[in-house]
Image: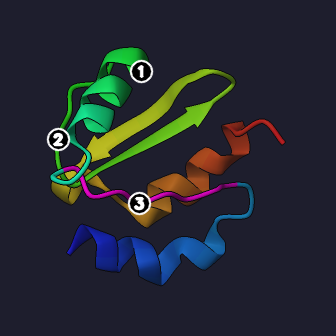
Amino acid sequence: MAKRRLDAGLENLEYADVYYFDILANRSLSNYIAEELGVHHESPQVIVVNGGGTTYDESHLDIQVEDLVEHQEFIQK
């Protein structure tokens, strides 16, 4: 459900590279990302990395495309 909501609104994100990955097939990468970025791993989850750090981290029903669109004003271009 979260991926469907994101897919429907991604065209509204001007300054973002979006990556999806299967955490079950890439668990070690998922653990590494969580450790390096200092986030608690959840699935589904959106993590925005900007300027070398995490600037947005939401999961499940808290993932809102509208929040990401508003958040993009903070993304370094």
Residue 45 percent across, percent down from the top left: 28, 49
Question: Which badge, 3 or 1, is on the more N-terminal residue?
Answer: 3
Residue 42 percent across, percent down from the top left: 17, 41
Tell me the CA gap for discs 1 and 2.
Answer: 13 Å
Q: Viewed as shown, does residue 33 lie left or right of 2?
A: right
Name which residue lies at 17% across and 50% down. Answer: 43
Q: Viewed as shown, does residue 34 lie left or right of 44?
A: right
For marks 3 and 2, give the one nearer the viewer: 3
Tell me the CA gap for discs 3 and 2.
Answer: 14 Å
- Count residues near mark 1 (Cα–Cα under 10 Å), then give few for <14, some for 14-19, many for 20+: some
Q: Which of 19 and 61 is in front in this view?
A: 19
Q: Name the residue under label 3.
A: 20
Q: Name the residue under label 2.
A: 42
Q: Name the residue under label 1.
A: 37
Q: Quarter-wise, where is residue 44 in the image? A: bottom left
- Count residues near mark 3 (Cα–Cα under 10 Å), then give few for <14, some for 14-19, many for 20+: few
Is 34 above or below relative to 59?
Answer: above
